[in-house]
Amino acid sequence: MESFPGIFVASTNLMDGLDQASLRRFDLKVKSDFLRTEQAWALLQRHCEVQGLEAPTASQAPALAALTKLTPGDFAAVARQHRFRERRSVADWVGALAGECGIKGGAKAAIGFC
């Protein structure tokens, strides 16, 4: 890495597996955490709008809030899955997001949507 003449960008979800000598070689380190509830809600609203679905209602917020390990990538995956498995409602979207969370170790999944 030290001899690379350009800009080197790397990412990992295994920070605990990197030794201190490796970490010292990176000038900048940025941590991306899971989405906060309001961020997940905004993404859900946007995806529903793009797909022409009804807007999510306040009664659906607790099911989304229960998904504590959501990332923008989860929303992107569900959007791509739409080509094969159409999502016809907000509940379908939340269920699919719960499925994405469910494959992550230790993630909470919304009961009743899987």
Image: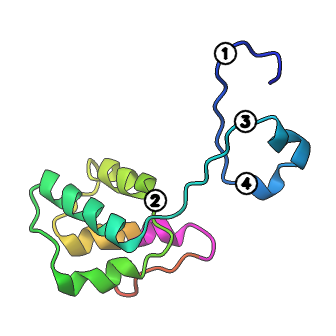
Could you tell me how far apart the alpha carbons at marks 3 and 2 are, in whole angstroms? 25 Å
Q: Earlier in the sequence, mark 4 or mark 3?
A: 4
Q: Earlier in the sequence, mark 2 or mark 1?
A: 1
Could you tell me how far apart the alpha carbons at marks 2 and 4 are, in whole angstroms? 16 Å
Q: Is residue 60 or residue 22 the one in the foreground?
A: 22
Report the mark closest to the observer, 4 or 3. 3
Which residue bears the numbered disc 1? 6
Which residue bears the numbered disc 2? 71
At 16% from the left and 65% from the top, the residue drawn is: 88
In the image, is 60 to the left or to the right of 19?
left
Quarter in which the C terminus is drawn? bottom left
Q: Amino acid at mark 1?
A: Gly
Quarter in which the N terminus is drawn? top right
Q: Earlier in the sequence, mark 2 or mark 4?
A: 4
The x and y percentages for residue 11 are 64, 42
Q: Amino acid at mark 2?
A: Thr
Q: Earlier in the sequence, mark 4 or mark 1?
A: 1
Locate residue 90: give its quadrant.
bottom left
Q: Which residues are magenta?
A: 98-106
Which residue bears the numbered disc 3? 27
Q: Secondary structure at mark 2?
A: loop
Which residue bears the numbered disc 4? 14
Q: Is residue 106 or residue 42 the one in the foreground?
A: 42
Q: Secondary structure at mark 4?
A: loop
Q: Amino acid at mark 3?
A: Asp
Could you tell me how far apart the alpha carbons at marks 3 and 1 are, in whole angstroms? 13 Å
Q: Tell me: residue 98, above or below residue 61.
A: above
Q: Is residue 28 or residue 50 the one in the foreground?
A: 28
Report the mark closest to the observer, 2 or 1. 1
Could you tell me how far apart the alpha carbons at marks 2 and 1 are, in whole angstroms? 29 Å
Q: Secondary structure at mark 1?
A: loop
Would residue 67 be seen by someone viewing this image from the given angle?
A: yes
